[in-house]
Image: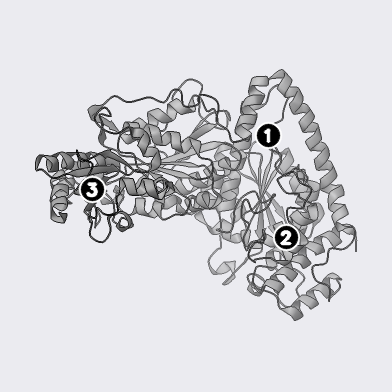
Amino acid sequence: MGIQQLSINTIRTLAMDVVEAAGCGHPGAPMSLAPVAYTLWTKQLNYDPRHPSWPTRDRFVLSAGHASMLLYATLHLAGVRRADDSDKLAITLEDIRNFRQWGSPCAGHPEYGAAAGIETTTGPLGQGVGNSVGMAIAARWRAAQFNRPGFDLFDHNVYAICSDGDMMEGLSNEVASLAGHLRLSNLCWIYDDNQITIEGNTSLAFSENVAARFEALRWHVIAVGDANDIEAIERALAQFNDVDDRPTLIVVRSQIGWGSPNKQGSPKAHGAALGEDEVRLTKAAYGWPEDETFLVPEGVREHFDEQIGRPGAKNHARWTTQFAEYQEAFPELAARWQCMIDGRLPENWDAEIPEFESDAKGLASRVSSGGVLRSIAQNVPWLLGGSADLAPSTMTLLDFEGAGTFEAENYAGRNFHFGVREHAMAAVLNGMALSGLRPYGATFLVFSDYARGALRLSALMGLPVIYVFTHDSIGVGEDGPTHQPIEHVAALRAIPNMITLRPGDANEAAELWREVMARDDHPVSLILSRQNLPTLDRTQLSSAKGARRGAYVLTDAPNGNPQVILIGTGSELSTCLTAYQRLSDDGIAARVVSMPSWELFEEQDKAYRNSVLPPEITARVAVEAACEQGWSKYIGLQGRFIGMRSFGASAPFAELLKRFGMTPDDVVDAAKSLI
């Protein structure tokens, strides 16, 4: 067989062998899509395998993450090196042999950070294509911001392979609609139309005309009738190169488990090992040595190097030379680019953060947070984002001169209109963060449920995405229980690696934004109020800087030996302060602890945590207009929780506080009951 077919069959047989060795996995899709991956990588991608972190490389996203061996085999054969600039392979043959085993970068589904070349974590269907839209947006924004006449250096293309399952998930339609609206012509999805799911043929639940749907979404659609037709795939990719006013969908008809005499085109090839006998039969059908396992024939790696390695190295070297010339011509822009790509913050980025004067009327934390956001964004040009059609309510619009709106006619804008698409917004933000930008997205807290799949992946990948969730409690008032979050703060706190922040006044909001920007390995959820919160008098209370430690003593008993500790977050912090004063008037020594972030508090050493919440003081009252889940860690079995134990209701906020028992008097009564 020729070297092209030999290379394709190497991908196929590696996929069969590793799934057989692991006893689990998905061999069918890599077997059918091997010609597609081969053609894309050897004929189309602008990619330097020896420098996989080259910032303007083309991106390849395997949204069909269950086909992970398609990616791992391709990265190995392409000779992709580790991101540390060593000459070691990112994916070795030994790594492949240990597919799905502890310590191997070849996990069951691709995991960002496990190896160079894995551009994002995929597996939950729809997320990968969502990220690809964010990557394409980031490429267009970077080009609009940094390209100059004679220096077209900062754009690139984004390719994603997606499955029938991706197409069924609503997320893919949300992001496809947005991509078509924005005319992202640097985006190409390759749809593996194999018409097979775990349960059987897709006709069991899926009968729409996908091509027609995408044409209606303003995509250019190309059909390839056979995944084995390399020339047809090349022609389709050439068409993509020529289209400059819309994204492209290439619909590729394939047979899952191609070559398997008894399982091709069957659900049996989808999510389980083929079986030893079937593997031998399939290898025979390929003209492959039946008894060989993990075979990479002589000449295959060299062929990949000739097709992508050497051309990629030349393109990268040319880009590096041109960038050096760019640095000479535009030193300030080049320095800004490097700062952004390195993940650093500009000097004096926080110089404009306001300090808020004490004010009994105060500000809603969505308002104070919005002011801080705008002050930072003026000094951090790659801090950008938008909302799910709620910018006037979430206060996240960047309204200073030059901010602009990101749209098809202006890719340099920093305000994004995601529409009523919370899940798409979050998935797109992940793709933007993976491209070196610092994105934020906003909606009402109750609608964080709609984005949860992407929120979880932000945390799993450790991406510095900023989520702004406003209207955080029954303080929403008359809008009623459909819009009043109850369990949502607890749900966000339950996500590992997610930092939740619920500031109690404007100066806490400012300090927490400082903490947000200083971190580059966690997503954060800012939980903000609709209603005004008093801006506390810091001459009489502790500095708001304590908020950055997650919890701090806001005010204490005169002798430093409280009988009871009141713990408040967000809008309930002022409730605790009022209760503290009433307890003091009754001769009861109390301490008020502001606790805007459990996660930041848990990062502190034990001595600090015990100084804030002394273990010997068991009389504790926590006050939060949300559900109780998790609070027992801080109040213990003897403590009291003042909060919500049901859904809310439609009524003015003050009335709701009385009805649900969250007034200062309720806090005082609870405190006295513990003494």
- Say whether residue 211 is visible: yes
Q: Tell me the colour scheme of the image.
A: one colour
Q: Is residue 483 left or right of residue 468?
A: left
Quadrant that contains the C terminus: bottom left
Amino acid at dot 3? Ile
* Alpha carbons under labels 1 and 2: distance apart: 27 Å
Secondary structure category for the residue under label 3: strand
Which residue is farthest bottom? 277
Q: Position of residue 296 (x, y in %)?
A: 84, 63
Quadrant that contains the N terminus: bottom right
Would you name the residue on which mark 3 appears?
Answer: 565
Q: Is residue 410 left or right of residue 540?
A: right
Q: Where, by quadrant of the figure, is residue 290 drawn?
A: bottom right
**Front in this rendered view, residue 78 or 50:** 50
Q: Which numbered tag is attached to residue 155?
A: 1
Q: Position of residue 598 (x, y in %)?
A: 37, 49
Would you name the residue on which mark 2 appears?
Answer: 33
Q: Position of residue 586 (x, y in %)?
A: 9, 43
Amino acid at dot 1? Asp
For the point 78% across and 60% down, the residue is: 228
Q: Nearer the viewer, mark 3 or mark 2?
A: 3
